[in-house]
């Protein structure tokens, strides 16, 4: 299980665990945006060019990008990551670590020499820098000014800064680099499915200066996003009332989760309002204990003391999590 | 309008045309596979690894690929075409012409020098050959033995043969190269949306020897296909009764379309059971006449005498097409 969300693998790992298996291994909002009625036409016809243009428009406003020409919609950001990394010739790629494993994988896939770095100052003369902001899994936040300054120093040598803002919807206000992409060497990635709780429809965005956005669109080709995703995305991203309510709801849930985890004597290392990162020397045993109790959390191949917990989505899940933590010795 | 299916562009081109606009500009089956009930979970959760494995299994059987390890599911074949073309280093790419415009575009995008050729014998020492079988738009069919022989001559120098079988579901039986991909340098592309009439869900396949398939999967990254597409695809591709009935139904419709077009003194150049290619010196005027009558057909920038007609999906569409052709002088 390299990634979260793989309940079928969890069921093989913990046969006999009580059902329903509770998936706390992702960073996906457990209170999804209500699906509108989706007409059969959305599934049958080729995705409409006008609907794609409308989505780009709504996304530019929602994310604060300079214009729709700076928006590239894709069937998930994972598919666009290697294309973004390939916008510059193979070079040294600095990946701010700890990080989402797809960052290093995508950079290596297109020929970059990947180097894990722990601070912006350590990026040196890397041609490509990839940073999560807020970062996954530790929730570390990078100041907007510091990232813009980094991009500016990279500019003269053709360097590219990629900021993965997959969790920016629940990040501190004013932190997004979306409005700064017109500087020309910044690409911002935004995930639709995580905050809107609709990871199954596959929708994500790259925000970039218009020439870079055009190159990414050409690589994706026509009809990259499905008809249903175009319709749901345009409606949800325009729903500012739902967004505001949901941010507050997730913040309350995250606070409640912190209390539950602290009650089990776990240290909270960080996180966002969509997940919390806990640390304990007993993490491997706790992972197995929770698994046997039918609760899947996220573990980390590079850090055996860490476990990441997503938000329980209902009272049954909260009770089962608390009960399982109570019986862990 | 480089591609078909863009009704919003058609409405701008022909303001005041009667509605509903009838779209005969694509090669998509107008009798779509009935959508199963799609649970909210399919939209909410990350696409399940087990569901992805099940789809690969069903697709291998439906298309006749050696095994599920030879199947790469993607959100449409358009997104996988440049990845397939990039499986070999930049070289000369022979594109069998006339052809689907994405073939040449994808090859050029990843650095190949594209050459349009009109026959297999003209491919020479090209590193990459892309051929549609049956071909779009002329319906030309290439013998399986001839294509295998071509792949075999390309093998020693590292050449790759790409066979776009987007319309093979309605092609002559026994013609697919799916079973031959284990030879190692053949990639077969299959479209799900065209034959099943569900182009909006974005689902397509590359069939290739396991090592090539693994490279393509790595380029797409995890969760390339949406939850709804995984579910619909697995159900539809296993439905052999629907497939057989639909093939007959499309064959009847294609025959009826030929009669309508011949009645309007158009020459049928070729086609498949999902579209017919007609030729007339009056094609530009006929395109405009049909457009003003609220009927969009496909024209070709490289051949002003051609128009491609998809199958009308209901009696109203048949009547409006016949009436519009009758009033064309």
Image (cartoon, coloured by chain):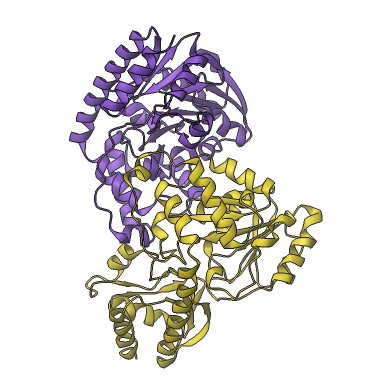
Chain colours: A yellow, B purple
Note whether A269 is above or below A73 in the view shown.
Answer: below
The quadrant holding residue B237 is: top left
Q: Residue A316, image x and y in percent?
A: 28, 80
Quadrant of the rendering where the N terminus of chain A is positioned: bottom left
At 56% from the left and 69% from the top, the residue drawn is A168
Q: Residue at x 40, y 40 (%)?
A: B204
Q: Is residue B190 visible?
A: yes
The x and y percentages for residue A287 are: 38, 78
Left of A196 or right of it: where is A326?
left
Report the quarter where the C terminus of chain A lies.
Answer: bottom left
State the residue in front, A167 or A158. Answer: A167
In this rendering, position of residue A207 left or right of residue B153:
right
Relative vertical location of residue A199 with respect to residue A263 in this rendering, above or below: above
Position of A283 compared to A174: left or right? left
- Residue A180 lies in quadrant: bottom right
Q: Is residue A14 above or below residue A50?
A: below
Location of residue B325 by image quarter = top left
Nearest the viewer among A219 and B290 is B290
How many numbered badges does the structure rendering display?
A: 0
Outermost residue on the front side: it is B16
């Amino acid at each position: 299980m390299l990634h979260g969300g793989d309940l079928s693998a969890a069921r093989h790992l913990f046969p006999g665990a009580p059902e329903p298996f509770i998936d706390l291994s992702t960073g996906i909002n457990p209170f999804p945006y209500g699906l509108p009625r989706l007409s059969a036409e959305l599934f049958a016809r080729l995705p409409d060019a006008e609907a794609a243009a409308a989505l780009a428009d709504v996304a530019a406003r929602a994310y604060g990008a300079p214009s729709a020409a700076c928006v590239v919609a894709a069937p998930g950001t994972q598919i666009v990551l290697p294309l973004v990394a390939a916008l510059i010739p193979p070079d040294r790629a600095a990946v701010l670590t700890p990080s989402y494993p797809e960052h290093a994988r995508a950079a290596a896939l297109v020929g970059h020499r990947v180097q894990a770095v722990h601070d912006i100052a350590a990026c040196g003369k890397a041609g490509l820098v990839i940073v999560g902001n807020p970062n996954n899994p530790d929730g570390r936040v990078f100041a907007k000014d510091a990232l813009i300054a980094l991009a500016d120093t990279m500019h003269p040598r053709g360097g590219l800064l990629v900021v993965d803002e997959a969790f920016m919807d629940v990040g501190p206000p004013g932190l997004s680099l979306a409005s700064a992409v017109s500087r020309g060497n910044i690409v911002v990635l935004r995930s639709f499915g995580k905050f809107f709780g609709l990871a199954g429809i596959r929708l994500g965005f790259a925000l970039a200066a218009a020439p870079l956005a055009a190159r990414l669109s050409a690589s994706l080709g026509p009809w990259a996003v499905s008809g249903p995703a175009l319709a749901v995305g345009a409606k949800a991203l325009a729903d500012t009332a739902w967004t505001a309510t949901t941010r507050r709801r997730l913040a309350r849930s995250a606070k409640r989760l912190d209390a539950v985890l602290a009650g089990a004597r776990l240290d909270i290392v960080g996180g966002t309002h969509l997940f919390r990162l806990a640390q304990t020397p007993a993490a491997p045993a706790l992972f197995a204990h929770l698994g046997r109790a039918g609760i899947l959390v996220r573990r980390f191949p590079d850090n055996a003391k860490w476990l990441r917990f997503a938000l329980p989505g209902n009272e049954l899940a909260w009770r089962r999590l608390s009960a399982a933590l109570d019986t862990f010795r």
